[in-house]
Image (tube, grey):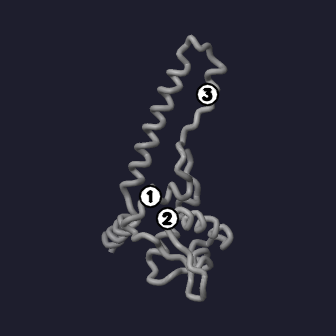
Amino acid sequence: MKIRKSFEQAICILLLIGAQDKPIKSHELSEKLLVSDSYLKKITRQLVVSGLISSMANKRGGFVLTKSLDCISLLDIFEAMEGKEAFVKTTHLVEKVFDSQLRVKETEDFIVDYLNAAENQYKQKLKEITLSQIIDAAHQEEGENL
């Protein structure tokens, strides 16, 4: 499994929005992140659809968080960018290749169950950390470097 760049960019977008006391416009975000405005809009659209941010289209508009930073976990962001569907979707191809007397279905189920358990552990770890904890960790590290 490979996490796309958009996951990292979504984290940064949310941190930038959370650091503002007013709405931030997409062109400001794209300038700070050095990405095209059109690409940034694709990411922010996913964040809007997932309910992590909202967009206000007016003169003073821009993006704002819909939740506080301590209520947004890495899992929330991951699911906003990657979706909530399971990592493993078997095509049952192995049943077409091997003799059914070899207990292929049971073996496939065993493997899928193991991979699903790994996915659950992965998502649980992502759920444990919030954006406010990331900011706190950055401030602690900054203080140690002084």
**Amino acid bearing label 2:** Ile
Determine which residue is flagged by label 1: 74
* Depth order, front residue of 57/34: 57
**Mark 2 and mark 1 residues within 8 Å of each other at the beta carbon:** yes
Identified at 51% across, 22% down, the residue is 107
Question: Mark 3 vs mark 2: which is more N-terminal?
Answer: 2
Q: Mark 3 touching mark 1, by CB under 8 A?
A: no
Give the answer, above or below, for where 27 lies relative to 109.
below
Residue 57 position in % (x across, y down): 60, 81
* Other-residue count near label 3 (Cα within 10 Å), few / some / many at <14 / 14–19 / ≥20: few
Residue type, mark 1 in image: Leu
Identity of the residue drawn at 50% across and 31% down? 112
Which image quarter holds the C terminus?
Answer: bottom left
Q: Which quarter of the figure has residue 140?
A: bottom left
- Please tell me whether mark 1 sits on a helix, a strand or a loop: helix
Earlier sequence position, callout 2 versus callout 1: 2
In the image, what residue occupies the spot 45% across and 55% down? Answer: 75
Query: Residue type at mark 3?
Result: His
Q: Which residue bears the numbered disc 2?
A: 11
On the picture, is 95 further left or further right than 145?
right
**Element under label 2?**
helix
Q: CA distance from mark 3 to mark 1?
A: 32 Å
Where residue 86 appears, x then y in whole percent?
53, 43
The CA distance from mark 2 to mark 1 is: 8 Å
Q: Residue at x 43, y 43 (%)?
A: 120
| Residue 86 or residue 17, whichever sits in front | 86
Residue under label 3: 92
Residue 40: % across, % down: 62, 69
Q: Residue 126: x, y in percent? A: 42, 53
